[in-house]
Structure formats: structure tokens, C-alpha cells
Image (cartoon, helix red, strand yellow):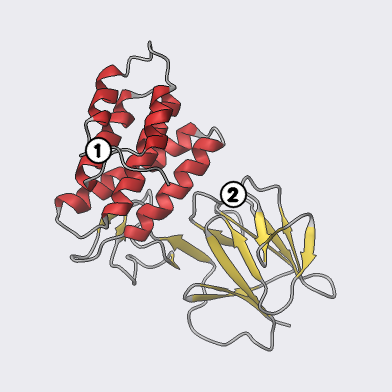
Amino acid sequence: MRYRLRFHLQEVDLVGEEIIIGRGSMGQITIDDPMLSRRHIRIDLSGTAPTVEDLRSRNGTQLNGRGLVDRATLTDGDRIRIGTQELVFLAPESAMNNDRNTSALRFCSGCAIPYPARSLHCPHCGAVHDEDGVSTEVRDGVASGWTFHLLSQVVVRAIEQGRLTDAERMMSRGVAELEEQLDRKLEVESGHVIEVAECSTRLGCALRSARWVEVGARLYRRGGEAPSRDVLTLVDELPADAGLGGAISALRHAGPGTRRAG
């Protein structure tokens, strides 16, 4: 019997009795998504019915919209949510033959769509990636607003979990890409710029880092809005001796006025 996973524009054959899916290269299916654990889930095809099991992943797994506890039987059309990705399990009768099979997918930082890792560039937006998986070129006229929205979600989650090193690494890449696109006059929705500005400020507060608060202030200016009351409240809670006076002042003067929270 042959099973497959549908993943955006890809369908992946499930070969063998055990399939490990995660961010690490040692698994049978690798997905380059920072929200995934190296060994995130296991699909077991050795029994009479296929099952899926969460491997104590950092961010958990959902099956058809519900949190996965222990393991569960898979049926045709089941939706497995891991990190920011959704996989659709296909039983043999619904799996379709095509020539797009792959066992390694890269998560594009230019448009947030996965594509075969063997490709030299993203076929959807034209982004070219270096060895670190960082977008180094985006085709003219293509903005990656969804990427910045996704970045904001991932970074906030990392901050909440205390993974500040991971959050700072992702923010460094994301802010560099965002400002590059803004400098090139590519269209990026102001709302996405503000989302990244807020994440940067939250990271600055968590790290007590003037650098990230100043980045937040700069992006608020570029997005044309002032920090929300929630962000300013977070700044107000910082100790007076945190050494962030100049950065906080720049943040408070970053827009025409305090916008409403929510």
C-alpha cells in the first residue's frame, strides 16, 4: 500500500515503515521551518492502520485542529499541523501520481511557501538562498508580506518560550530582508512593517537591548505609525536603570501619535 503527504504544491511518497518528519536532516522528510523540532513527528506504517505520533516536539502537533496527545490513527484527508505548516495525509486510493515527489523541502523566506530543496531558487517568488537558507535575492516587484507576518508570529512565540537567542537570530534575518525590500521600493504593507517593529521592540524589552528598541523605532517610522499602547506599557515596565533611555525616547517619538491597542 502506498501513502503520501500533500504539502502545499508537493506530494511526498511515504516510504518504509517509519517516517520521521522535522527540521533535522536525519529524518526521512526535512522541512526548513524554525517552529519545528529536529524530530517533530513520526508516522508509523508498520501496523494494520497508519498512525502519527508527536515526538515531544517543542511546539506540539495538531491533528484536524486538535492537539495531538500520544498517537492517533490516520485516515485519508487528515490534516497534520506542525509549526506553521499543514500536511494532508493521503490514503492510497486518493494519492495521485505525479513527478513532483521529494523528500526534502525548503521553507522559502521570500514568500513562505515550501519548494524542493534541490531547486536553486524558489519557483514561486524567485528568491535565491545561500547556504544558511537566507534569501539573498528577490525578483523585482515581489514583496514577501506574508513572510513578515509569519516572522512576527514565530518570534513572539520564541520570546514567550524564553528562546531569546533563536528570536534574535530570526529577527536579524527578517529585519535585514524587510529593510532591503523597503530600500528597493518594493511594496510591503505598512501593517507588516508595524508587526515587525512591534516584535523588535518586544525583543528589545526582553533582552534589555537598546539596539532592538531602536530598530523598532526605526521601523515604526518607516511604517508610518506610532507604537501601540500595549508596547508602550511594556516599555514603561522596564527598570529605570536598564540603560535604554535614548532608545525609548526614539520609540516614543516614532509616530504621529499613540495608536489604539488591538
Q: Nearer the viewer, residue 101 or 161?
A: 161
Which quadrant holds residue 12? bottom right
Residue drawn where x is 51% and y is 86% of the image: 98
The outermost residue toward the right is: 48
Please tell me whether mark 1 sits on a helix, a strand or a loop.
loop
Residue at screen point 29% across, 37% down? 258
Residue identifier under label 2: 38
Q: Can you tell which quarter of the image residue 17 is in? A: bottom right
Q: Is residue 39 left or right of residue 9?
A: right
Task: Determine which of the numbered discs, if any, sits on residue 249 in the image.
Answer: none
Amino acid marked by disc 1: Gly
Quadrant of image for the N terminus: bottom right
Residue at 29% over, 24% down:
248
Q: Residues within 10 Å of mark 1 (few under 14, many from 20)?
A: few
Element at label 2? loop
- Foreground residue among 24 and 236: 236
For disc 2, the neighbor class at 10 Å (few under 14, some 14 to 19, many from 20) is: many
**Where is residue 89 drawn, in percent x and y?**
65, 74
Q: Which residue is mark 1?
A: 257
Residue 229 or residue 58, whichever sits in front: 229
Q: Position of residue 13 (x, y in %)?
A: 61, 76
CA separation in Å, label 2 and label 1? 44 Å
- x and y percent of residue 144 in the render? 31, 60
Say which of marks 2 and 1 sits in front: 1
| Residue 8 in the figure: left or right of residue 222 | right
Q: Is residue 116 above or below residue 35?
A: below
- Amino acid on which the number 2 mark rests in the picture: Arg
Residue 21, located in which quarter of the rendered image? bottom right
Left or right: 143 with respect to 5?
left
Residue plotted at (66% across, 72% down)? 15
The answer to whether residue 3 is above or below residue 174 is below
Which badge, 2 or 1, is on the more N-terminal residue? Answer: 2
